[in-house]
Amino acid sequence: MVVFGFGLAVLVGTALLLLPVASTSGTPTNWVTALFTATSAVCVTGLIVVDTAAHWSTFGELVVLGLIQIGGLGIMTLASLLGLLVTRRLGLRMQRTAQTETKSLDLGDVRSVIAGVIMVSLTVETLTAAALTARFAIGYGQPLGHAGYFGVFHAVSAFNNAGFALYPNSLMRYATDPWVCVPVLVAIVIGGLGFPVLFGIGRRLRQRQRRLSLHARITLFTYGALVLLGTVTVTAFEWSNPETLGRFGIGGKLLAGVFHGITPRTAGFNTVEVGEMHPATLLVTDILMFIGGGSAGTAGGIKVTTFALLAFVIAAEVRGVPSVHVMGRKLPNGVQRQALTVVLLGVGMVIAATLTLLLLSPFGLDAVLFESISAFGTVGLSTGITADLPHAAQLVLVVLMFTGRLGPITLASALALRERGRRYELPEERPIVG
């Protein structure tokens, strides 16, 4: 049902973008371009093959904006509901334990989840839009209507981690303007943490709950650590690069470094030219994009909790501990296997797509790998090759964006729902490892 729903949204969006009124020229758009744009919007990716403001009319831009909103709300709602479904399949004792311990989601109240997602989304988007509108109108002298339209569009795009912008070079013109960059970054982080974490934080603040759930604590810790790692590495590697951070003063370098330490969380906006970054920076960005953001949020990737779980498993194995304990709790073996499955299948998808793009396009490994991971992680950052790829390669990215957006969510849920006990075990034999 999840796959069908998102597929239908993509098809409807494609049909609307094919209409002559959707383009500035008044002529029908190529079907591959329409399909690519619709998929990128619904999957809140941000990769584009045509300039959004130059190619699409106001009607076309509103269609893209609507698809972004539908995709973001749909992902947060469906992922949260799937999480509830998985939790309800636990035994009664485990349900009571989980509900008492986490108090992050009511196990039976579906309406509260949907209402909470909509309320959080609209609140953050409204506040971000107000801040951006004020800055565009006061700081840059834009007419209020124009500033409001641009503010709303970029606020919705930022909260949903979509990365679509109404400027041909994303947000590069505002690289040193904190009044634009900071509201965008705040919206990106809130959207990327995931609704269960936001809901848990809200309940803790209202009810003075003793502590957050294990999921929320893992997400916040890992998300913060990755943001710090990304900010430090990008700033250090690009500090003297005249094509990126090197042309700014110290304040501008720090702001742009922070921005590009956060945007690989699948936001997709950029304030410097990504294609001019050093190979080491691109590799770090590849890793950050593949990991992504929080579960049941607008971010993509394998999710920070999945990455953290594998790190905990490795740490336990290195210490020779038979079970994995994290923050006062034991991780079930099934969760460990699910995390490993999601990661390895994600790696396989990226490798297969990268190999295919290398065969279909003239570009090198660095650019193609970056493009594949950006599509799989629904990030939207690009070294600038998207529009120059042949149609066959663009269709490969369409498939990768769709499966990368829905794959980790539906796969993890399906694995959890299929888990069942075994009534017998075969004789044990240990093969040689390493």
Image (cartoon, rainbow, N blue to C red):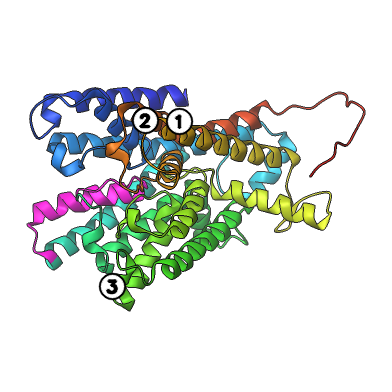
Nearer to the camera, 146 or 301: 301
The answer to the question of whether label 2 and label 3 lie on touching residues, with beta carbons closer than 8 A, is: no
Residue 70 in view of the camera: no
Nearer to the camera, 400 or 140: 400
Residue 393, disc: 2
Tell me where residue 262 appears, x and y as whole percent: 42, 59
Q: Secondary structure at mark 3?
A: loop
- Judged from this view, the residue extending furthest toward the bottom is 250
Decide if residue 55 is on the left or right side of residue 210.
Answer: left
Q: Which residue is mark 3?
A: 248
Gap between marks 1 and 3 measured at Cα: 38 Å
Mark 2 crowd level (few <14, some 14–19, many ≥20, 10 Å Cα): some
Residue range of the region highlighted in magenta in the rendering:
140-166
Going from N to C along the chain, the mark reached first, 1 or 3, is 3
**The C terminus - image quarter:** top right
Q: Secondary structure at mark 2?
A: helix
Q: Secondary structure at mark 1?
A: helix
Q: Is residue 187 magenta?
A: no
User: What amino acid type should be assigned to the residue bearing mark 3?
Assistant: Phe
User: What amino acid type should be assigned to the residue bearing mark 1?
Assistant: Thr
Q: Which residue is mark 1?
A: 356
The answer to the question of whether label 2 and label 1 lie on touching residues, with beta carbons closer than 8 A, is: yes
Tell me where residue 248 appears, x and y as whole percent: 28, 72
